[in-house]
Image (cartoon, grey):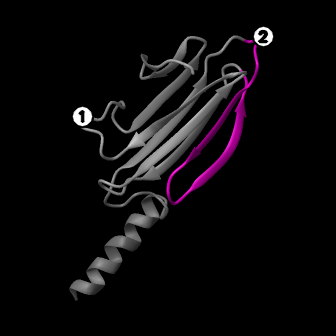
């Protein structure tokens, strides 16, 4: 009886939300926004985790790249490398081991600007 109730509960949850969404763990969305000058080079970015390589993408001014995932507590880590002309920066876009999550609720909003890389409006890194 309990087994059937559990199966019914999971099936019902899939009807009201995507079966690919996070059921027990939280879902995180990482957004990378190009706030670079319109007359400059495109922004190249490549993000990956140990399980998923999201490939290389290019952004023009005011374009956004977004990806989402379900957190594996204490192990999820997404790393990104951004390149803008001859400038570049590699950084952790999300790390489940961060103490005091610097992201806003469940979204990490990164922005590439001409003077560096920002998270939630605060400058985190200079270009190298």
Q: What stretch is highlighted in magenta?
A: 38-60
Q: Quadrant of the N terminus?
A: bottom left
- Helix, strand or loop for disc 1: loop
x and y percentages locating residue 101 in the rendered image: 29, 35
Report if the CB atoms under discs 1 and 2 are less than 8 Å apart.
no
Magenta span has 44? yes
Q: In this view, does 96 lie to the left or right of 81?
A: left
**Which residue is labeled 1 in the image?**
100
Q: Which residue is drawn at 66% across and 20% down?
A: 62
Dot 1, how many residues are within 10 Å of its Cα: few (below 14), some (14-19), or many (20+)?
Answer: few
x and y percentages locating residue 88 in the rendered image: 62, 26
Q: In this view, does 111 lie to the left or right of 77?
A: right
**Which residue is labeled 2 in the image?**
39
Residue furthest bottom as drawn: 1
x and y percentages locating residue 71 in the rendered image: 38, 53
* Frontmost residue, 84 versus 59: 84
Dot 2, how many residues are within 10 Å of its Cα: few (below 14), some (14-19), or many (20+)?
Answer: few
The picture quadrant where one finds residue 113 is top right
The picture quadrant where one finds residue 105 is top left
């Amino acid at each position: 009886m309990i087994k059937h109730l559990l199966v019914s509960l999971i099936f019902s949850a899939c009807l009201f939300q995507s079966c690919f969404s996070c059921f027990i763990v939280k879902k995180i969305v990482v957004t990378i926004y190009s706030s670079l000058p319109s007359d400059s080079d495109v922004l190249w970015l490549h993000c990956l985790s140990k399980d998923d390589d999201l490939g290389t993408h290019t952004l023009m001014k005011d374009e956004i790249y977004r990806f989402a995932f379900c957190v594996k507590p204490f192990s999820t880590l997404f790393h990104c490398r951004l390149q803008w002309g001859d400038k570049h920066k590699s950084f952790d876009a999300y790390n489940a081991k961060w103490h005091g999550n610097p992201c806003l609720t469940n979204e990490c909003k990164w922005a590439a600007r001409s003077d560096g890389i920002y998270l939630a409006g605060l400058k985190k890194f200079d270009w190298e």
